[in-house]
């Protein structure tokens, strides 16, 4: 019962967060300098044209009325039309989603496959002197290299050195699946570097936190083999922080897409977003930012609810978080 | 992440322990000092960055006259890099100071007042935390217009939620301790308790989190300027130079390599500094299994 109440409370706070995100995104587009009609019609428009457009877009209404109309449309999946292509924004984004999703999922997979083992080994060897400094610097380097610097350097390397891969001719997974995956590998690898290092650090911290628990000492005292202890006690009990991190990583990957897709000439949501920034296509900017934030909130909610299934203690300390 | 109350109580002792040799700590501190000194020197050395310097040809490769080569207008890249380091650090430090003040105040007030105050602070934090850093920064740049102000505001909004959460969690533990209850019963004014008893005991967390916020700040300034919405020409910043380096990648690869590696060194040094401070100020013990 208590767990159910806790879950209900979490879903409710999730909804509050989503509402706040909507308010923020709406306000951000309203404090833009200059009248929307001027931006849309350009300097050559007549006052009558501006008047008509302002009327048409409902910009004469009060802010609250505008917001309620906007949020009503958004809830029905209508983010308005792109002012450039005149197509519904959601359709434009859906068209480009598979490309961005492939890169994000590949990067996440790479990060977890590298980060979790590395972090575990680092934690188990934490009390040793040798190699500690080197491993700190290497994992520190991973979270310190900005994705745009790494991406640009990779593009530079592959453009000037004969490394066998040409950057720029991207194939989408919706065209040819495996060629799509292959051409997503390089951008995904660039994004995966930060994620893998962050995963390794979180895993290391989580494992170190578990290692001080009395049940580990008890297991050691019982004479269990180290490999068994790591598998049965350590990794299972340190899985929640790693699970929580994946939500944060997903948010990072959606943001990173904005930079990496432009660098690697990938026609995904990220490069479309940058194009929208250049063209001041506010409906697209709003929808893109909103989409990323909503994905993060839903993912966090999913993670929290599944953490409470892995470890029921999570739902009993709800107040202390 | 949550250090024990006992470890925070010895924050001052932890800082003192830093003096005992830790090669990583001193390397990181050394690298940062060097970067900052270099950017100051860049402003002081005559002929380097005061407009009287000789202008070379466009995109000249590194040479004796221009150790890092020249940019698209024939200016010495070294001079622009030193100026860029200065801009990036000034902007990032200013933003982090704002973040530290806002986040510490909100975190302590939320923990001390509890109830609705805490709920509101945490929910606003949740909302801001939901946006990927660079998207939030771009959204702000789209509404405020590109430039240094947008970069500063973005950094503050990106770093405040996490720091508030961390300081709030640390303060929540301190607030429950006997000396705080004691002070409350004795009738000490709330603001005084928050400063004298709570702030003092979360100082370690504040220092550690502010250091990490600085590395995020350099990243956000870099990303925003790289995309063309942060610091604008003719000024210089590390992100702006990296952006130029990206455009002229094949003509003048030294611009990208010099600005990119400077940025990596700066962020790495700040992160390592944060790690060392965290290990000292919020220590944990572990058993050796292998």
Image (cartoon, coloured by chain):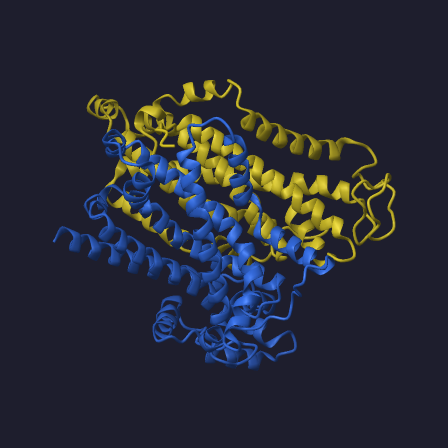
Chain colours: A blue, B yellow
The quadrant the C terminus of chain A occupies is top left
The image shows residue A196 at horizontal and vertical percentages of 48, 49
| Direction from residue A218 to residue B161 in the image, left or right | right
Query: Could you tell me which residue is drawn at 27 percent across and 35 percent down?
Result: A224
| Direction from residue B76 to residue A103 in the image, left or right | left
Q: Nearer the viewer, residue A317 or A176?
A: A176
Judge whether residue B143 can be spotted in this image. Answer: no
The quadrant the N terminus of chain A occupies is bottom left
Judge whether residue B288 can be spotted in this image. Answer: yes
Q: Nearer the viewer, residue A120 or A16?
A: A120
Q: Nearer the viewer, residue A243 or A227?
A: A227
The image shows residue B218 at horizontal and vertical percentages of 57, 44
Figure check: B212 above or below A1? above
Write down the quadrant of residue B190 in the picture: top left
Figure check: A78 above or below A27? below
Outermost residue to the left? A1
The number of callouts visible is 0
The image shows residue A257 at horizontal and vertical percentages of 53, 61
Query: Could you tell me which residue is drawn at 50 percent across and 63 percent down?
Result: A103
The image shows residue A7 at horizontal and vertical percentages of 21, 55
| Direction from residue A125 to residue A133 in the image, left or right | right
Query: Could you tell me which residue is drawn at 37 percent across and 48 percent down?
Result: A242
């Amino acid at each position: 019962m208590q767990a159910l109440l806790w879950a209900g409370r979490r879903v409710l706070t999730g909804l509050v967060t989503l509402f706040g995100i909507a308010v923020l995104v709406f306000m951000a587009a309203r404090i833009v300098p200059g009248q929307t009609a001027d931006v849309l019609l350009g300097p050559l428009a007549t006052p009558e044209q501006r008047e008509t457009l302002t009327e048409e877009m409902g910009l004469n209404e009060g802010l609250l009325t505008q917001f309620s109309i906007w949020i009503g449309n958004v809830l029905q999946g209508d983010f308005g039309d792109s002012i450039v292509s005149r197509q519904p924004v959601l359709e434009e984004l859906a068209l480009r989603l598979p490309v961005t999703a492939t890169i994000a999922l590949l990067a996440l997979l790479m990060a977890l496959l590298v980060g979790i083992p590395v972090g575990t080994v680092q934690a188990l060897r934490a009390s040793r002197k040798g190699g500690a400094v080197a491993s700190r610097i290497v994992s520190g380097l991973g979270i310190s290299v900005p994705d745009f610097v790494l991406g640009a350097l990779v593009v530079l390397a592959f453009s000037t050195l004969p490394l066998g891969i040409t950057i720029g001719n991207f194939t989408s997974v919706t065209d040819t699946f495996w060629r799509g995956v292959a051409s997503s590998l390089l951008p995904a690898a660039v994004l995966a570097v930060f994620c893998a290092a962050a995963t390794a650090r979180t895993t290391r911290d989580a494992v170190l936190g578990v290692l001080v628990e009395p049940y580990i000492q008890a297991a050691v005292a019982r004479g269990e083999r180290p490999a068994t202890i790591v598998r049965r006690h350590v990794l299972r009990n340190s899985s929640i922080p790693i699970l929580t991190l994946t939500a944060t990583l997903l948010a990072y990957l959606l943001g990173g897409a904005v930079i990496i897709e432009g660098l690697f000439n990938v026609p995904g949501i990220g490069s479309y977003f940058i194009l929208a920034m250049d063209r001041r296509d506010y409906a697209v900017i709003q929808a893109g930012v909103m989409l990323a934030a909503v994905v993060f909130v839903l993912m966090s909610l999913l993670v929290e609810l599944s953490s409470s299934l892995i470890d029921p203690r999570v739902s009993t300390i709800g107040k202390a978080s | 992440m949550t250090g024990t109350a006992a470890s925070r109580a010895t924050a001052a002792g932890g800082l003192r322990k830093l003096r005992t040799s830790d090669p990583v700590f001193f390397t990181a501190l050394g690298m940062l000092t060097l970067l900052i000194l270099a950017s100051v020197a860049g402003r002081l050395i005559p002929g380097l960055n005061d407009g009287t310097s000789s202008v070379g040809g466009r995109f000249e490769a590194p040479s004796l006259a221009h150790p890092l080569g020249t940019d698209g207008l024939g200016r010495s890249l070294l001079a622009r890099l030193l100026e860029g380091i200065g801009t990036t650090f000034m902007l990032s430090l200013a933003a982090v100071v704002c973040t530290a003040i806002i986040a510490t105040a909100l975190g302590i007030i939320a923990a001390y007042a509890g109830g609705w105050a805490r709920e509101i602070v945490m929910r606003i934090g949740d909302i801001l935390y939901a946006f990927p850093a660079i998207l939030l920064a771009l959204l702000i740049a789209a509404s405020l217009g590109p430039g240094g102000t947008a970069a500063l505001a973005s950094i503050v909004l990106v770093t405040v939620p996490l720091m508030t959460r961390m300081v709030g969690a640390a303060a929540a533990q301190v607030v429950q301790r006997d000396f705080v209850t004691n002070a409350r019963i004795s009738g000490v004014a709330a603001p005084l308790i928050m400063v004298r008893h709570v702030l003092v005991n979360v100082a370690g967390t504040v220092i550690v989190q502010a250091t990490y916020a600085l590395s995020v700040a350099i990243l956000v300034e870099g990303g925003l300027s790289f995309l063309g919405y942060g610091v604008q020409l003719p000024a210089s910043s590390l992100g702006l130079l990296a952006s130029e380096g990206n455009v002229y990648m094949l003509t003048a690869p030294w611009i990208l390599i010099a600005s990119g590696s400077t940025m990596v060194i700066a962020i790495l040094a700040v992160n390592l500094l944060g790690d060392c401070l965290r290990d000292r100020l919020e220590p944990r013990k572990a058993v050796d299994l292998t």
